[in-house]
Image (cartoon, helix red, strand yellow):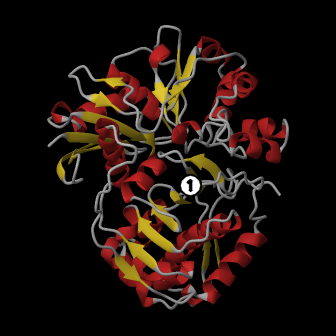
């Protein structure tokens, strides 16, 4: 049976899965860390891929890379990296996002690109470089995303033969989900001149070969990879609690949300992936664990010891600025502290605040016509017992928790298997049984949170 490799090159690490192409059975895995920070030399990703993929990549008949979205990889005319890549969570380009948005307005950007600009998106990072590093901007001959650069390296080709896919292209701010074409004027308006961009490949295309002869699929953005790995269907919405929080589902129609709350991304199969992203998710819990001086189990016990509503405490979890809503300079806010405040209340407020930010995402998707019939909870923070038991009441719907797995890497592996097979549809792999949690909506929690959120600014980013 053929073996395929799926790569997840995330903010924090590279993970590689070696998978049987027909069954989806995982036969090997590896992991290697990335440097910390909001910018990174792309060579560090390549080094991590070699380490994580040792003994795996050379056994694969096909490989695909899913990567963190929006990161700006700038190359000169010789294909050399101009500067460390600016990552999705780098917010320094917030002023440039405002300036670019003013050219045409939010509704026009949403219609043209599916996005209302925030500092996360690649086009704003190009504008920041042009303004603050004009020499680097002048040297930039090609621009690509992290997964594009790694795919190019795997193939051993130059940027003139580089490829990307619809899902990652849709997060740049210079590609149109409606036409499937780049918008060169957006690049010129940000960077100051034209730049070579990767060809957008078909979802199941073989775009090249590795030096050892393995087929290389186009790859995907990380959230599209997770959707493919989970096999999302109509009415399925994922809440992914990693470094960032993402709420997304598949749709046959594209989103064009002028408020900027919902990003109108494409998915990895030819459909669309409307998505809400928050900068603050699992690290909110990490911060409060550190403040309380407890480990994971002790934190969960504290949070579950408090009543819903956290004894009147409410956390607005915008600890390091926020993307949705668009508040890049925000900080966290705790409301309701009294002399009776307890450690348990603080822990519960952290969990409820983090989940309430994702519940706002569910509501925003519903406003775009994507009503959740089933919520799948994934990501590192979904392992928390407190998160699991509190999520259903905060979301107001039943929640299912799939088995713990590297769904982004699994989605990349599924794409590789799809390309290798030559079939019209991706393979259907069984992800295993899900745990189902039911709960009635905790009205007090949602009211406390929405009151605090609205007191500190409008929910809708651009209204």
| Image quadrant where one finds the N terminus | top left
- For the question of whether residue 5 can be seen, the reply is yes
**Where is residue 296, by image quadrant?**
bottom left
- For the question of whether residue 338 can be seen, the reply is no
User: Which of 181 and 327 lies nearest the eye of the viewer?
Assistant: 181
Element class at badge 1: loop
Identify the residue shown where x is 32% and y is 39%: 416
Position of residue 383 in the picture relative to residue 50 (left or right):
right
Q: Which residue is mark 1?
A: 279
Position of residue 64 in the picture relative to residue 131 (left or right):
left
* Residue 247 sits above or below residue 63 on the image: below
Image location of residue 133, percent across then percent down: 65, 21
Image location of residue 335, percent across then percent down: 66, 77
The residue furthest front is 424
| Image quadrant where one finds the C terminus | bottom right
Crowding near pointer 1: few (<14 within 10 Å), some, many (20+)?
many
User: Which of 101 and 41 lies nearest the eye of the viewer?
Assistant: 101
């Amino acid at each position: 049976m053929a073996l395929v490799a799926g790569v997840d090159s995330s903010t924090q690490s590279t993970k590689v899965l070696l998978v049987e192409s027909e069954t989806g059975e995982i036969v090997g895995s590896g992991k290697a860390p990335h440097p910390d920070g909001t910018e990174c030399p792309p060579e560090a990703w390549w080094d991590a891929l070699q380490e994580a993929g040792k003994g795996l990549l050379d056994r694969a008949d096909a490989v695909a890379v899913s990567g963190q979205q929006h990161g700006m990889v700038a190359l000169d005319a010789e294909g050399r990296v101009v500067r460390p890549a600016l990552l999705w969570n780098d917010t320094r380009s917030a002023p440039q996002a405002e300036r670019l948005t003013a050219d045409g307005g939010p509704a026009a950007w949403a219609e043209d690109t599916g996005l209302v600009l925030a500092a996360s998106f690649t086009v704003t990072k190009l504008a920041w470089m042009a303004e603050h590093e004009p020499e680097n901007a002048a040297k930039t001959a090609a621009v690509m995303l992290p997964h594009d650069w790694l795919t190019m390296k795997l193939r051993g080709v130059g940027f003139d033969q580089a490829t990307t896919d619809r899902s990652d292209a849709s997060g740049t701010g210079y590609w149109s989900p409606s036409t499937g074409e780049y918008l060169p004027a957006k690049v010129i308006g940000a960077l100051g001149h034209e730049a070579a961009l990767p060809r957008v490949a078909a979802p199941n295309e073989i775009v090249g070969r590795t030096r050892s002869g393995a087929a290389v699929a186009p790859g995907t953005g990380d959230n599209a990879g997770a959707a493919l790995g989970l096999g999302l269907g109509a009415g399925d919405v994922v809440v992914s609690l990693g470094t960032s929080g993402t709420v997304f589902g598949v749709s046959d129609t594209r989103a064009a949300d002028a408020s900027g709350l919902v990003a109108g991304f494409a998915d990895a199969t030819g459909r669309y992936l409307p998505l809400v992203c928050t900068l603050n998710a699992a690290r909110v819990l990490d911060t409060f664990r550190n403040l309380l001086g407890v480990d994971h189990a002790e934190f969960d016990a504290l949070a579950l010891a408090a009543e819903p509503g956290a004894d009147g405490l409410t956390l607005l979890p915008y600890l390091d600025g926020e993307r949705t809503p668009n508040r890049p300079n925000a900080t966290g806010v705790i409301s309701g502290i009294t002399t009776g405040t307890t450690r348990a209340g603080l822990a519960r407020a952290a969990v409820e605040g983090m989940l309430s930010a994702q519940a706002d995402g569910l509501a925003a998707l519903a406003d775009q016509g994507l009503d959740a019939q089933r919520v799948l909870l994934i990501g590192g923070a979904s392992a928390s017992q407190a998160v699991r038991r509190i999520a259903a009441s905060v979301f107001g719907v039943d929640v299912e928790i799939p088995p713990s797995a590297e769904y982004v890497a699994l989605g990349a592996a599924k794409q590789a298997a799809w390309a290798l097979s030559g079939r019209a549809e991706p393979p259907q792999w069984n992800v295993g049984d899900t745990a189902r949690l039911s709960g009635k909506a905790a009205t007090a929690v949602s009211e406390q949170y929405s009151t605090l959120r609205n007191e500190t600014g409008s929910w809708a980013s651009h209204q």
